[in-house]
Image: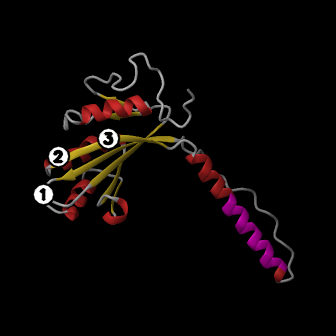
Amino acid sequence: MNCGAIKQKLAASGAEAVIETEYARKGFALNVQVAPEQLVAAVSVLDAEGFFIEAVTGVDWLGEQATLRKEAEAKAAAEAKAKADAAAAAGEEAPAAAPPAEQGELAEDALEAVYDFNHYDEFCRVTIRTRMVRSKPEVPTISHIYPGADWHERETHDFFGIIFVGHPYLVPLLLPEDADYHPLLKDFRP
């Protein structure tokens, strides 16, 4: 077993992206992006190869779409200014500003579940990431494959509100039982 073989097996399992990284910089050898419906298949590959789970956590990408939109607008404005400056330098009339390009419907901001796996015998730390829309933060549980994920999924649900579908006991672990809030969401207000 080596990271190259694992990379091929993960790609064959339906992963959207399997990227080798520089371990010294990132802290993991493979960065895997999967759709929520492909998560169990990818995790099953790692289980079959003798990996153990280190952690499950979440990331709130609130504001990402607004940032991407601002970056696209700034790039378009810079390109228009460059064309106008070039036309002025050539003694030509500046071209009329083109209407902004339709970007279509931008995706909703997302939540991400992040799973870290390692191997006792081989040096191959793997991170699996799966994104879901904030309005429906659901991903299948992996606690039937890795029973140790039970606690991690409950904690992630407490803090980020991600629902691990099929989890045997998804009740608050660290928050009060009646908590209806998720304190690590960026829009959380106490």
**Quadrant housing residue 155:** top left
What's the residue at 30%, 58% (across, down)? 28
- Element under label 1? loop
Residue kind at label 2, given as amino acid type: Asp
Pointer 2: what residue? 47
Residue 103 is at least partly visible in this image: no
- Please give the range of residues in magenta: 74-88
Mark earlier in primary sequence (3, 1) = 3
Pointer 3: what residue? 56
What's the residue at 77%, 69% (across, down)? 81
Distance of label 1 from label 2 (alpha carbons): 14 Å
Position of residue 56 relative to residue 30, above or below, is above
Q: For this rendering, which residue is in front, 68 or 169?
A: 169
- Residue 106: where, in percent of width, then height? 58, 45
Q: Which SS type dominates the magenta stretch? A: helix
Distance of label 3 from label 1 (alpha carbons): 22 Å
Mark earlier in primary sequence (3, 2) = 2
Q: Examine the structure image and report whether residue 79 is included in the region drawn in magenta.
A: yes
- Element under label 2? helix
Residue kind at label 3, given as amino acid type: Val
Position of residue 23 relative to residue 127, above or below, is below
Pointer 1: what residue? 121
**Number of marks in the image?**
3
Residue kind at label 1, given as amino acid type: Asp
